[in-house]
Image (cartoon, rainbow, N blue to C red):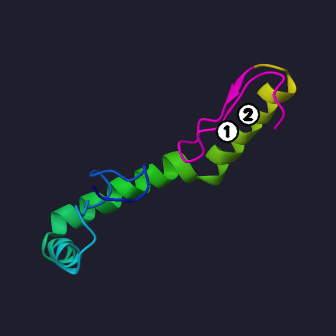
Amino acid sequence: GSGGLSEISGKTALMVPAVTAEAIAAATERLITDVELRERLAREGMVQVREHFDIAVQAARMDAFYCAVASGEPAVATDVSQKLSVSAGSKV
């Protein structure tokens, strides 16, 4: 399968089935020639960046995570790239 980050999907990027020069060239050519596809991928990518990686969003997630840990409640980080899970009483 294709490698890459789990946050990237067919909505935000062209998925190349194998890392070969031919597959990358075909995907690049498609992006160059298909204006609608290129613009849609750009829009969807920006939405994903704003939803998942915006500094305010990340700060709020970290704040909620540390507040839960400090209060002794089970805490789960909601950032998909980290997949952290800490139970009450666990050492961080």
Residue 61 appears at what percent x and percent y? 67, 38
Q: Quadrant of residue 24?
A: bottom left
Q: Which mark is residue 65?
A: 2
Query: At numbered mark 1, what does the secondary structure look like: helix, strand or loop?
Result: helix
Magenta stretch, main secondary structure, is: loop
Q: Quadrant of the C terminus?
A: top right
Residue 57 appears at what percent x and percent y? 62, 44
Looking at this view, is 72 or 53 the one in front?
72
Question: Which segment did they paint magenta?
Answer: 74-92
Residue 10 appears at what percent x and percent y? 27, 52
Residue 32 appears at what percent x and percent y? 19, 77
Q: Which mark is residue 71?
A: none
Look at the numbered discs 2 and 1 and tell me whether their residues touch, using CB distance below 8 Å.
Answer: yes
Q: Which mark is residue 61?
A: 1
Left or right: 76, with 91 as reference point? left
Q: Quadrant of residue 27?
A: bottom left
